[in-house]
Amino acid sequence: MKLWGGRFTKPTDQLVEEFTASIHFDKKLAEEDIKGSLAHVKMLGACGIIPQKDADAIRKGLLSILADYKAGKIEFSVENEDVHMNIEKLLIERIGPVGGKLHTGRSRNDQVALDMHLYLRKETKRIIALLADVLDAIVNVAEANKDVIIPGYTHLQRAQPVLFAHHMLAYVGMFMRDAERMQDALKRIDIMPLGAGALAGTTFPIDRTMVAEELGFSRIYDNSMDAVSDRDFILEFLSAASILMMHLSRFCEELVLWSSTEFSFVELDDAYTTGSSIMPQKKNPDVAELIRGKTGRVYGNLFGLLTVLKSLPLAYNKDLQEDKEGMFDTVDTLKGSLALFAGMIRTMQVRRERLQQAVKQDFSNATDLADYLVRKGLPFRQAHEVIGRLVLYCIEHGKFLADLTLEEYRAHSDLFDEDCLQVIDIKQVVDARDVHGGTGSRRVEQALVQAKQSLADL
Ligand code: ARG
């Protein structure tokens, strides 16, 4: 017999039962569901809506189900459709008809919304903690390689050299914003829907504030119809998750490039790479690739829910049951990706000698030579032209700027003096960018201190 079976004369079609059930996935909400029910029943007793002794019996029953659930002793069934009805049915089996008083003044519509808020609040906090660990790993690798210079790119062509730490700190900026976005999403996750009933509120004199306080929510929904049909808080989480995955995918892409023979800037640890079933020499950056690839499913989950919600009339509709799997999948994907990413960064080796060589063999100090001529009074546009010709001359003669004699410099402009060679020294090129946000080592040193402070405040 179904909990809602009264007005029906026939059993549910077997396929309908399978099709409409959500227990296969919403069983993940079992603990949240019981916690929500415990708060609800405490309020029902305190407000005199049900006798205190009944509230006590229900509380005991729920606690015994919770203990058995944690011990892995509970089996849910498809006949009972979802986690809410499975647990209520179990309660009635355990403590008798008094268990049927739990659902007084409540609907599954506000109940499921509550469970989702509780679940996402818990998981978002965990994700922020994992993000903090990723940030810590990045700051540490930056610090350990503070003196290392790497080529900086635009269009994936060598542009200007930067400190390796500066490159790392760019990602610190991104992930700090991700953490802020998650914290901001928490503000809307932290609103309590219970008390909305099916859609219109309830005829019982409930105390919603008491339930909110009991469950640690700082606000309650002001409109019952909004409370049961709102899934914005999940969309915000999925949006923040998508941006975060996009950042991870960019970093992973760089690691894939950097660990290739062509770049050889870093070596990923054996523990974070895999081999080939046919090519004995291979060491593949599978973890980085897979995190990059999993970005796709997180975007998909965001678009899936946006599409479910599009044009949905008020208030609850069964469509809303489709909010769960994408959210669960996103939470699991994020947690897995962040944990692995942190480990991959912590164990990665920066190939310092190789990088020392790499930054010498390019023209990424050309801008500095143009700036040199500007300081001698030449308008920048003309200086750009002169250095462009000089680079062309180098290419034609198989040289780099540092290989030229003063005569060769002077042949292109008589503004060149001996000191021009100093400005193209690679360390000087980096340190000369001594502006806020620039790669000069003094600035990067300050940025590292700042990053550690922001991380401690997170
Ligand atoms: N399993 C449902 C869901 O996840 C619970 C709410 C069902 N409410 C209803 N009136 N059918 O959305």
Image (tube, helix red, strand yellow):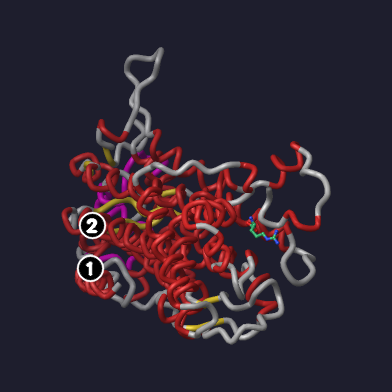
Image point (36%, 57%), residue name: 160
Residue located beneath label 1 in the image: 448
Q: Is residue 293 above or below residue 105?
A: above
- Marks 2 & 1, CB-CB < 8 Å contact: yes
Q: Range of the magenta residues?
A: 395-417
Residue 240 in the figure: left or right of residue 80 = left
Q: In the image shown, does 61 or 370 lie closer to the viewer?
A: 61
Quarter assignment of residue 166? bottom left
Q: Which residue sits furthest right? A: 9
Image point (35%, 41%), residue name: 258
Residue 415 in the figure: left or right of residue 314 = left
The answer, for residue 279, to whether it is visible in the render is yes
Residue 12 in the figure: left or right of residue 229 = right
At numbered mark 1, what does the secondary structure look like: helix, strand or loop?
Answer: helix
Q: Which mark is residue 100?
A: none
Q: Quadrant of ligand 1?
A: bottom right
Quarter assignment of residue 201? bottom right
Q: In the image shown, does 390 or 448 lie closer to the viewer?
A: 448
In the rendered structure, which amino acid carries the disc numbered 1?
Leu
User: Mark 1 or mark 2, which is nearer the start of the sequence?
Assistant: 2
In the rendered structure, which amino acid carries the disc numbered 2?
Ala
Q: Magenta segment: does it hold 227?
A: no
Q: Quadrant of the C terminus?
A: bottom left
Q: Position of residue 102 (x, y in %)?
A: 54, 67
Q: Position of residue 85 (x, y in %)?
A: 59, 55
Q: In the image shown, does 212 or 141 lie closer to the viewer?
A: 212
The residues tagged by marks 2 and 1 sit, at their Cα atoms, a distance apart of 8 Å
At numbered mark 2, what does the secondary structure look like: helix, strand or loop?
Answer: helix
The answer, for residue 424, to whether it is visible in the render is no
Q: In the image shown, does 127 or 434 lie closer to the viewer?
A: 127
Residue located beneath label 2 in the image: 142
